Image: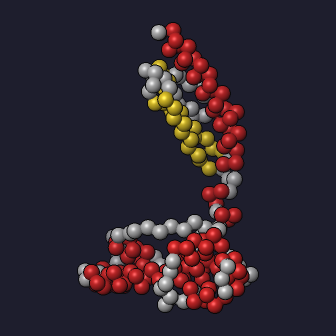
Amino acid sequence: MKIISDLIYKVKEAFKSKEYRHAYVDEFLNVSIATQIKVLREQRGREWSQKDLADKVGMKQPRISVMENVNYSSWSINTLRKLAKAFDLTLRVSFESFGERIKEIDQFNREALERASFEEDPYFKPEPIDIPVRVGMLLGASFSLESPEVSKEVEDKTMGRLFYFDVKQKTSKNKMDAYQEEKAMPRYERLLETNQKQAGATQ
């Protein structure tokens, strides 16, 4: 059973007031943006001073200092886009429920605010991972390709039906294109040719 912290319990009770909950989350939004800007800058090393960030964004250093102040509230989407580009991140702006916001408040810490730049993003690292690939076509066959070494059965379908094949291979992302070209597509082309011949024979 999860124990709710005293802070979160008090916040949940206070949020029953509409004016209070909107004022609270507005203040938290300002604090979280300002804090994250500072956290992201410091995460990137000592060479990222406020002046360095200002140069990357095309601003003056005092402007960055102001935006890292938790009392700042005059945010604009355009400014946040510039900051995201400087950090080599993507900006997300979304509407959230109050329940989700309370979860963010409860988990508000430095680690939760850190983000990896594109160069450091593990998603783009060529490490072995499982990658599902699906290709759909308006053709008359259906088959599944689970590994390049396993023979497949072709199930005839009425021409015009949607079919797909799945590939889930333990491989590196940077090898996926070569894998598709060398293994998956030749098999697909042979199956397509067979299917077209069968369809022609039934006409």
Measuring from the top left, give residue 145's x and y in whole percent.
56, 32
Q: Is residue 112 visible?
A: no
Q: Which residue extends farthest right?
A: 47
Q: Which residue extends farthest left?
A: 16
Position of the N terminus, as image quadrant, is bottom left
Badge count: 0
Q: Is residue 179 above or below residue 58?
A: above
Measuring from the top left, give residue 35's x and y in whole percent.
54, 83
The residue nearer to you, when weighing 180 against 108, is: 180
Residue occupying image coordinates x 60% and y 27%: 188
Q: Is residue 136 above or below residue 202?
A: below
Measuring from the top left, give residue 155's x and y in whole percent.
48, 22
Residue occupying image coordinates x 70% and y 85%: 51
Q: Is residue 190 above or below residue 104?
A: above
Q: On the rendered structure, is 4 left or right of 114?
A: left
Colour style of the rendered protein structure: secondary structure
Residue occupying image coordinates x 56% and y 13%: 197
Measuring from the top left, give residue 160's x and y in whole percent.
45, 25
Q: Is residue 138 above or below residue 36?
A: above
Q: Is residue 89 visible?
A: yes
Residue occupying image coordinates x 42% and y 78%: 106
Q: On the rendered structure, is 115 left or right of 177?
A: left
The residue nearer to you, when weighing 118 against 106, is: 118
